Structure formats: C-alpha cells, structure tokens
Image (tube, rainbow, N blue to C red):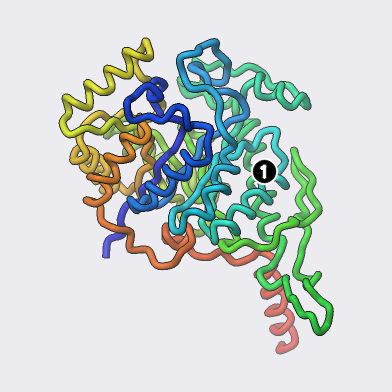
Amino acid sequence: MTRRPTIAVALDGAGWHPAAWRDPSARPAELFTARYWRDLAQFAERADVDLVTFEDALGLQSSTLWSTDERTDQVRGRLDALLIASFVAPVTQRIGLVPTVTTTHTEPFHVATGLQTLDIASRGRAGWRAQISGSPHEAAHFGRRTVPNVDIEALLAGDSEQIRAGLDEAREVVEVVRRLWDSWEADAIIRDASTGRFIDRERIHGAEYEGEHFSIAGASIVPRSPQGQPLVAVLGHQTIPYELAATSADLVFITPLDEAQSVSILGEVRDAEVRTGRTGRPLSVLAEVVVVLESTPAAARAALERLDEQNGSPLTSDALIFTGTPEQLLERIDAWTALGYDGVRIRPARLPRDLEQLADWVLPALGRSDAAGTTLRERLGFELPENRYTAAAAAAGAARQNGEAA
C-alpha cells in the first residue's frame, strides 16, 4: 500500500497573511487564549492532519526579517509555543505536536526537559522545530552577548555564511539535547518497594559533552519519554541549513517556488546528506506552501487581493504562495510526492478559514492515515530509536563474551 503523504499544518496567530486577523473567519479576540489553540489543534486532529507546528521566536513579529518595526495594523505578540503544545497535549489523542524552540540563547538542558515533558504529556506525540535567532534585539532580551547585524539582502541572495555560527551552535544544541534525552535508559525506573529502590542508578548517564559552545556533564531530570527521541525538524532555505538538517534532524521543511526548484532543492538536500556522512534513515522532506483556498481560482485570487489591500502591500513569503482550489492544491501535492517529497507543511493564510477548506476538501481526497501505533514516530513511519547507552552496554557485553569465547 502506498503511504499517504505527510500533512503538516503550521499554526501561527490568525494565519500567515499579516492581515488575516481582519478576515471574517478570524477570531482576533481569542488569539491569546488557550481555547483558540485547543480548537485549532482538535479541528486539525479530526481532519486527520499528521502534525501541527506552533511558530515562536524570541522577539515580536515584524514586517522585516530579524529587526523590529512600528506597525500597529498587524498581529504582534505570541504565546510560548512549547507551553501551547503542552496545554493541547492532554486534549488531543493522535496528532503530532511540534513547537518551535529557539536554540540561540536558550540552554540545551531546558530545551531537552521541556520537550521530554511534552512527549510524556502527549503520550509520545512530541516533536521539535529547532530554530536559530540572528537578531540583535532578541539578544538584548538576554544581555549575555551581542549578535552582529545580518546583511538581509545578502542572506536572501544565498549568503548563509553569516549565519553559520548560529547554525553550528544549533548543531551542538541538538546533539546535547539528544544526549540528555538518552541519559535515562528505558528501564532506569525500578519502583521496587520491597528493596527500597526506585531507580537503578547504573542506568542513568551524564551527557558528557564537550564542544565549542557547551560543556555538559549531567543527566536529564526527566525519565526517558515514550518516543525516546522526539522527532526534530529544521526549516532550510540554503546549503548550510540543509547541512544542519542532514546532521541533526529527522525532518526538513524546504521552500521550492516552482517545478525546477522542486527538483534542484531536493537534490541539494540529498547531496548534503552525502556530504555530511548521514547514516540511517534519510531525511523526511516536506515542501512548504502558503495557501489561500476557495471554490474557484478567481475567488481565491480575490480573497488574497482583499487581504493585500488591507495590509497595504502584496503578501511576500519564503515559500510558494498558492491561491486556487482544493483540487489544484491536490495536484500540487501529487507533483511534489511524485518527485520524492514525503509530504507538505501547509501554512494557512487565514485561520481558521483555510484550515477548514483543507479539512473539507483536501484531506478527504488524500485518504485517512493508515499508520499503526499512537506516537508521532509511528505515524510518520519512524522506528523507535535505541538508547545510545543501552546500545553501548550491549556492544560491550557482546565484546566480552566474544573475548571469553576466544
């Protein structure tokens, strides 16, 4: 049986269009309430979306990349993505919950324990979209270091060298977090009242990491979570981010704008895997797309034009902006999967309007997910990872046996 494409939905405010909060379907008075996020996640789950992501950053939203602006006609302010996901976890059952947690300025220990707790609260449905911060105004919130200004024009033109340091730090953060996730073996908790032993101390390990940015010796305070290793996702636009994904992630979200880029970017991702020596399962690659869905192409274009007029300028995005019918979006998804993409991450321009259109027309046409199991790993076809310390102990035991036999 052919596996259904992975369908991820990126939730952000009232939608991905800056004027979406003014759309008749919007609920701007509820953006900062728990009920709003519960309703979106539960609706996406009923529609059989595989996972939802929650956007976040260390500074206010802005109309310019990595800098502030003075606009008052767009949504400003967010709730913490990891906390939203943790709230939503007990009121959902099947859908994956993937918050954005920034690797810059935050401590790997706090990232690791927060995501482990989410994985436990969701019974194995947690993921993590790792994201860097490159702006001086976000660094000022912490006061521990300064960050040089990024040449945005050069960055958009393909010069990712200026963010290499942030991505190298992110690679270390993911490595430390993964070590902390493994620091408790699955059977470390004994709960043997007769002997008075709650844990087996021999099955709890220090992370023991020494790198350029971090020196970590201790173990996590959270026991091993249901997935062991929650899935890690990275959004990539250029070579260096693709390499971060290849070394550190399970999923990568990429932004092809046309057919030619759909082929070339997928090739770049696979080249990055070879270049970095990735072993095991290849990256799961999802195409990003902003959607405005209506019953006819003309109605979709008109909807976008209304929002653009309210915003005072046309919508711009790093991803493809799709305006059309659900049938046309299905054709686009089919074209990507035919090229070897594993699925899509859909950014609804309007919430809940475009999410409702997905639920009513797009997802039913794709069919229900046939994944067995309840965890996000199982839903997306990932194996349960072996704990590195359990594997090391097993390898050492096998070596001793071989030595004795010899």
Please name whichever residue, 37 or 293, is drawn nearer the observer in this view of the structure. 37
The quarter of the image holding the N terminus is: bottom left
Q: Nearer the viewer, residue 328 or 397?
A: 328
Q: Nearer the viewer, residue 154 or 401?
A: 154
Q: Is residue 349 rendered to the left or right of residue 99?
A: left
**Residue 372, horizontal then vertical, whole percent:** 39, 67
- What residue occupies the far bottom of the structure in this picture? 405
* Residue where numbered disc 1 is placed: 173
- At 26% from the left and 48% from the top, the residue drawn is 338
Q: Is residue 380 visible?
A: yes
> In the figure, 22 relative to 256: above or below?
above
Q: Quadrant of residue 362?
A: top left
Where residue 117 sits, quadrant-wise, is: bottom right
Residue found 53% across the figure and 32% down from its top? 32
Amino acid type assigned to the residue bearing label 1 in the image = Val
* Image location of residue 189, percent across then percent down: 72, 71
How far across and down, in percent of the image, does residue 123 sit? 54, 61
SS for callout 1: helix
Depth check: 364 or 370 in front? 364
The quadrant in which residue 149 appears is top right
Q: Alpha-carbon neighbours of circle 1 within 10 Å: few (<14), some, or many (≥20)?
A: many
